Structure formats: C-alpha cells, structure tokens
Image: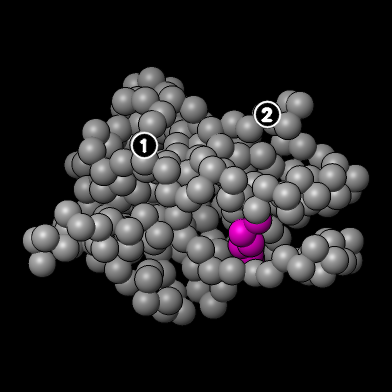
Amino acid sequence: MAIEVFNRYEHKYMLDRKTYEKVIEVMDQHMELDSHNENHKPYTIANIYYDTADDHLIRASLQKPKYKEKLRLRAYGVPKKDSKVFLEIKKKYNGIVNKRRTTLTLKEAYEFASSGKKPNLKEYMNAQVLEEINYFLKVYDLTPKLYLAYDRIAYFEKGNPDLRISFDTNIRSRRYDVRLEAGDYGELLLDGDVYLMEVKTSLAKPLWLVHMMTDLDIKRTSFSKYGTEFKEMVNSPQMKSFA
C-alpha cells in the first residue's frame, strides 16, 4: 500500500546537466533507484492544483508564511476516469512538510473536489484524510487552476527508507484544459538542462550526502513549481495588458 501520511523536511537544489551527471554517479553508489526508474528512465508525475478564484492559496504561499497549505490531485502518467489517483493536502509549518493523501478514482476525485461531497467510503480510501479534505473544501471555494507535470528519477537510501532523493526535469504546465486525462503536455517552466533535486527526510542528512554537496558546491535554494509558474503567469505580457 502506498504511504499516505508524510512528515519530513524537503530541501531543494537546482542542478545543471554536468552537475546532475556527477550527482547521479554518487547516487548509484549509495542509493537504490525507485522501482519505476528501470535503467534510469524517468516516470511522469502529473498534478492539478486547486485554488480560489483570486488565487488565495498560492498568493499566501509566496509570502513565505510559517504555515501554508494547498490541495492537489496527482497521477502517475495519463490516467483514465477509472484510474487510481491521489487527492492530497500538503501543509508546511516551520520548514516541516506534512502531506496527507487518499487514493480515489479520477472520477471520484473530480466529483469530490467540485461538489465538496465525500464519496462513499471504499477499501482503498483513507477515511481520516477524506474528512480533512472535506473540511478543506468547506473552508475554501476551490476550482482546478493549473495542470503541472514533470519527469522524475527517484532514489531511496539502502537500509534507510526515510531518505528519498528525487530529480525532476522537463517541468511543464498549462492553464487551459486542466484535466489529467487530457494528455501530458504544456509549456516548459525551466530550461531542459536544469534539474530540480529534492532531498526528503525527517532525519539528518547522511555524511556521504553532505560531503557530496560540499565537493560539488551544491547550495540549497527556495523553489516552488506552482509558485514559479504563477509568478511567470502574473508577469506575462498578456496579464500585464489587463493591469
């Protein structure tokens, strides 16, 4: 069964292709590839981000408050209406990320998010998370605002399942036809040779990882996929013409 509750730190780093290739050499020495990354082939994660009509959630998040939250719908690849997906609340407080998600079919997730009415409980659903999402939907009047997808390679440390390191590239998005089943396409958010590395753990980083970052001069950065897309959208010539 997929893990449905996470509490951890998520630190981000931007890598160019040359640095990424050096990092991967180290990863292969200390960590194991995700089962979906056979022969270092990435898998696709697709998301729909929900927000209010005035984009309250992402605007609040960009102010870097101590506490922030968001709701998103996640699929692996392009799902069909009866495919299993994840509807999840992601919260961050004082640097600690809490993610709570439940499995639903795509059709059930759409209906829940649009109507605010919980689906009938089934064995693959998490009842507690359904209640939390139900409350979230009552607090905020949400609509699907953004489709955002990327290709991921992920690693787990040998003997330490707490540590997960992922590399995302080819980040693309669209604000039209915001449906997961509509296909995996959109405008690129970053240059194709840029990789977003995320280190996710509830514990201290292992020494080998700290040494690698020091040797390769890899520095932590602040980066939000949704936040970056939103700022680019707001600053686009088309949006400025309405100002």
**In terms of image quadrants, where is residue 141?**
bottom left
Q: Say whether residue 157 is visible.
A: no
With 97 as the anchor, is 67 left or right in this view?
left
Residue depicted at 78% across the width and 51% down the height:
23
Q: Earlier in the sequence, mark 2 or mark 1?
A: 2
Residue 186 is labelled as 1
Q: Residues within 10 Å of mark 2 (few under 14, many from 20)?
A: few
Under mark 1, the amino acid is Gly
234 w.r.t. 80: above or below: below
Count of marks placed on residues: 2
**In terms of image quadrants, where is residue 53?**
bottom left
Location of mark 2 (residue): 41
Q: Percent position (x, y) of residue 118?
A: 30, 41
Under mark 2, the amino acid is Lys
Q: Percent position (x, y) of residue 217?
A: 76, 68
Main secondary structure type of the part rendered in magenta: strand
The quarter in which the C terminus is drawn is: bottom left
Viewer-proximal residue among 27 and 8 = 27
Residue depicted at 65% across the width and 69% down the height:
220
174 w.r.t. 67: above or below: above
Q: Say whether residue 67 is visible.
A: yes
With 28 as the anchor, is 90 left or right in this view?
left
Q: What stretch is highlighted in magenta?
A: 9-15
Viewer-proximal residue among 112 and 106 = 106
Residue depicted at 51% across the width and 48% down the height:
191
Viewer-proximal residue among 224 and 142 = 224
Indicate whether residue 13 is drawn in magenta.
yes
Q: What element carries label 1?
A: loop
